[in-house]
């Protein structure tokens, strides 16, 4: 009820503040009335795998694609005050009788406050609309109800086997189909949607490598039995320092050495990619700043490179790797490693050196391509891969001997230096 005539401004203000419509309870009830009739839906997408019955619960690797949705527009001001209480208070004053109307001066101040309040409410609602994600509304649900449902999106089941079972000594055709589709759809959402196919393909390659590892330790005694995590390369790419932002490698790969897939020793390498399968080995991209064997290799080549040439000219190397006609094994070896070779002669060697093409190399690798059909069950792929790796053993052992010569020379220099320091200390 508005203040009576004759009351002072302070008394009128206290009278207005004491009305029930201006309390916090009134504000809360007003906000509840406003929110009643609003219908909003909070959705959350959850992936789960198929099981025998067709529906299953999600596992720990499954991701929720939807983000948390903020609350609807609030009527509260940034400082926590509620403008609706003032508006209700002003509207209730219109119901009083004419004899209790305030003076023109008091009415003018009330109207000014009302306009300021309405302007603040409008600005607050506009700001909240920009910073709040709108919830979807479902017209089929009743008014005033809040729907907090979860939408479960089933993942794709694995490909059908078509009568071909998974075997540990071969690669299933579905594995090649998955890698081919991944190359054409190299995106995270596609990968998550086809996670079941990835799991089946990865398990197929893992079992194949486990079978191959048992044979590798037999043909090269320097290869220790290692767990799969030390042999297999991850399918996830490191995109931090590259312009290619595709998140996955469209192939499976494994490497064997004295220290597994990592380390500076020579590797046996197997690469499984549709249309680009290859097998080989060696040392790739030797660094001059961290030269494990690079300087020793150049010194050997400078003296004629007889050991390297003898390994490359072995009949088994020509049978499995150097099969290009009208080119010598040495020329084919240089052509295989031109990708990261130096454009100019290395420091300390003249341009007209007889072996300048070998001296410019920073990678010493040998490889050959395999067709996808060579991994089929009727071709005995494990036996064929072992035969090729066996022909590569002398080359890998030669490279490791160069590395170990470098390590031995570094150790001898260190021991001589420490011994000289000890002699100087004694004197």
Image (cartoon, helix red, strand yellow):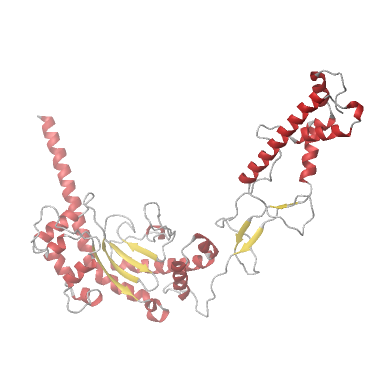
Q: Residue 202: where, in percent of width, then height? A: 46, 66
Q: Is residue 117 visible?
A: yes
Quarter of the image that includes the N terminus: top right
Give left or right: position of 420 versus 239. left
Give left or right: position of 324 versus 60. left
Q: Residue 32: where, in percent of width, then height? A: 78, 42
Q: Which of these two is toward me, 326 or 109?
A: 109
Residue 378, above or below 53: below
Would you identify the image quadrant in which residue 210 lies? bottom left
Q: Which of these two is toward me, 105 or 42?
A: 105
Residue pictured at 41% horizontal, 59% vertical: 234
Q: Residue reaching furthest bottom?
A: 378
Q: How many numbered callouts?
A: 0
Would you identify the image quadrant in which residue 361 lies? bottom left
Residue 356, above or below 313: above
Give left or right: position of 386 versus 96. left
Residue pictured at 50% horizontal, 68% vertical: 200
Q: Residue 45: where, in percent of width, then height? A: 62, 57
Quarter of the image that includes the C terminus: top left
Q: Residue reaching furthest front?
A: 104
Q: Which of these two is toward me, 168 or 101?
A: 101
Q: Is residue 17 visible?
A: no
Q: Which of these two is toward me, 138 or 386?
A: 138
Q: Residue 217: where, in percent of width, then height? A: 32, 65
Give left or right: position of 305 versus 182. left
Residue 7, above or below 277: above
């Amino acid at each position: 009820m508005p203040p009576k005539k004759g009351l002072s401004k302070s008394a009128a203000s206290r009278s207005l503040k004491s009305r029930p419509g201006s309390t916090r309870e009134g504000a809360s009830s007003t906000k509840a009335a406003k929110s009643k009739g609003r219908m909003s839906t909070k959705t959350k997408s959850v992936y789960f795998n198929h099981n025998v019955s067709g529906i299953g619960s999600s596992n720990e690797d499954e991701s929720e694609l939807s983000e948390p949705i903020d609350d609807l527009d609030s009527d509260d001001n940034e400082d926590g005050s509620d403008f609706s209480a003032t508006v209700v208070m002003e509207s209730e004053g219109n119901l009083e009788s004419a004899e209790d109307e305030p003076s023109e001066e008091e009415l003018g101040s009330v109207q000014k406050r009302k306009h300021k309040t309405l302007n603040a409410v409008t600005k607050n609602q506009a700001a909240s609309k920009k910073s709040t994600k709108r919830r979807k509304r479902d017209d089929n649900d009743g008014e005033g109800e809040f729907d907090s449902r979860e939408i479960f999106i089933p993942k794709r089941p694995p490909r059908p086997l078509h009568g071909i079972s998974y075997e540990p000594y071969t690669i299933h055709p579905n594995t090649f189909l998955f890698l081919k589709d991944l190359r054409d759809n190299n995106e995270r959402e596609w990968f998550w949607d086809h996670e079941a196919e990835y799991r089946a393909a990865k398990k197929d390659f893992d079992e194949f490598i486990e079978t191959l590892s048992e044979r590798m330790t037999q043909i090269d005694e320097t290869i220790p039995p290692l767990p799969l995590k030390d042999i297999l390369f991850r399918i996830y790419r490191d995109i931090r320092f590259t312009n290619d932002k595709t998140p996955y490698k469209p192939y499976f790969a494994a490497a064997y050495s004295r220290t597994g897939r990592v380390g500076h020793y020579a590797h046996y390498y197997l690469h499984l990619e549709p249309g680009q399968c290859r097998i080989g080995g060696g040392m790739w991209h030797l660094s001059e700043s961290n030269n494990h064997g690079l300087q020793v290799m150049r010194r050997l080549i400078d003296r004629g490179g007889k050991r390297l040439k003898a390994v490359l000219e072995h009949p088994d190397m020509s049978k499995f790797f150097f099969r290009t006609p009208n080119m010598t094994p040495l020329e084919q070896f240089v052509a295989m490693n031109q990708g990261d070779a130096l454009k100019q002669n290395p420091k300390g060697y003249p341009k007209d050196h007889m072996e300048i093409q070998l001296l410019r190399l920073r990678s010493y690798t040998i490889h050959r391509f395999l067709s996808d059909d060579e991994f089929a069950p009727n071709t005995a792929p494990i036996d064929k891969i072992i035969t090729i790796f066996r022909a590569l053993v002398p080359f890998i052992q030669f490279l490791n001997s160069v590395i170990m010569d470098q390590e031995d020379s570094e150790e001898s220099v260190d021991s001589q230096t420490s011994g000289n320091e000890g002699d100087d200390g004694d004197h």
